[in-house]
Image (cartoon, rainbow, N blue to C red):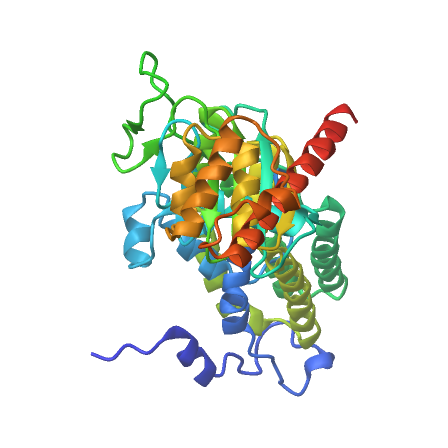
Amino acid sequence: MFIPQLPDVLDRRALYSGNAPLNDSSNSGGFSLNTGGMASFFGGEVAVTAMTTIHLDPTRRWLGWYNSPGTYEVARRYGRVSGSKFLEGLFPGVPTDLATLLGLEELKGTKYIGAHNGTILEETGPFSALLMKHFVQHVEMVEIPGRKTQPIAVTITELSHTPSNQAVLRTPIYPPIVAGIPILASVGTATACGVFRDWFSFSLIVFGILVNGISCIVIGAGDFVFQYPNRRVGVPRDSILVSDRDKENIVVMGSGDGILVSDKDKEIIVLRGSGDAVNSITSGSANLRFRWQYWIKWCAILLVFQLIVQILLIPQGTLFGQIMFIGSLAVSWAYNLWLSSKNKESIQGEVFIRGVLRRPNAWRYSLGTRTSAVVFMLLAVKPKDPGKILNMLIPNDTTEWLRFKDDILSRIRTNQDLRFEASFLDTLAPEQDKGLMELLYSDAEAAYEGYLDHLSRSATKRTS
């Protein structure tokens, strides 16, 4: 049996007969805008995106008193998390994973290498990806002088704060005054309809204001909860532990000093801090925890009921009232579009940096070659086995490379300066590629000078 789609049916039906109530002289020709289907389905994805910002910004929860479009899509997405069998049947096939609403399910972090405990994670959680993007966008780059082939960025961050588990993340992001625009537009258009006695349009706008406002309060009661696997008490600090929650989720033990490496983005991030601080980055996850989950069901039903009422009653209003109704939706849609235009990943990264890591100090440097970047990173993180990390990141094993690696590793282990005079380069064996060796040692010296510059910058920042 063929069942036509609701919007298609509405487009082919005449929703106004010319004999509706309140058909005053301004609409004496019997003309009526066919706005029912548009009001219910227009701007759905934008409305859902705007609704998810409530979980990140606490002020947004109380500022939803405007007539918003896209109510059907909001009801469809949030109705599935209410646990109602009725709504599951009404909206089949919609994903119930709350991470989908947050937009975290597609974020994959980069490789992590522990500096002291031997931990290696080929893939980390979404918050390491958010951290890397945040540093790229918000931390000023300092260029280290030296040879340039394929520049690599190295960011050094000090995680001085040990985050709490099960933390609720909420940070003011959007200026509350902007929400006054759709609120005033909805109230103003409803007042205009009341002045001209178009009670159908007046009632629909007021009903939309109430439904959206109540939905924002109820749905906004859900908390954006951040969590990460903790260390077990009594387990040796140098061990590697598998989380109870997820057997594939490795927990960084002891000192969390290590590096995040992205060959694709040519980025290296040096993490310096406790194991818990690094765990929050490499293994952290987030979810929505609804305090009023039962009432979400009734909000979804109200949103669906609003859809039906708009379809049936808006053609009964006057032409002026319908224009006012569309005007309130247009302003609200523009506001929702403004909310959704801000990159969700950037917002979540900002919330993570503020709420979990408490804005750690970070310095970002650009080094001209991979060799100089890796040597700079080794000087900054001072790993337990620098040779292992060096060979992982630079696997070259020719005679020249092996001699260069052995010499640099020996100097790093004994805290020697990486400065090389011309007399030293003259001592290189004649059978070796002297030109290559000179380039490698010049890269190492550039990295050492950059590291000394970093020590000066970090000391100045701590004292300021």
- Residue at position x 72%, y 55% in the image: 187
Q: Is residue 361 left or right of residue 311?
A: right
Q: Position of residue 164 (x, y in %)?
A: 50, 23
Instruction: Answer whether residue 168 is visible to the viewer in this image.
Output: no
Q: Is residue 311 visible?
A: yes
| Residue for point 49% across, 68% down | 41
Residue 255, x across and y down, in percent: 45, 23
Q: Quadrant of residue 20?
A: bottom right
Locate residue 437, reporting x and y percent: 52, 52
The image quarter containing residue 69 is bottom right
Q: Quadrant of the C terminus?
A: top right
Residue 95 falls in which quadrant of the image? bottom left
Q: Is residue 455 above or below residue 403?
A: above
Query: Who's the residue at 45% across and 78% down the image?
Result: 10
Is 84 placed above or below 331 here?
above
Quick one: 25 or 324, which is closer to the camera?
A: 324
Outermost residue, top side? 234
Q: Residue furthest bottom?
A: 29
Which sits in the foreground, 341 or 412? 412
Name the spot of residue 27 as percent of width and height, x first: 68, 81
Q: Nearer the viewer, residue 37 or 52?
A: 52
User: In terms of depth relative to the viewer, which is nearer, 139 or 280?
Assistant: 139
**Figure check: 252 above or below 143:** above
> Could you tell me how many numbered marks the image carries?
0
Residue at position x 57%, y 54% in the image: 439
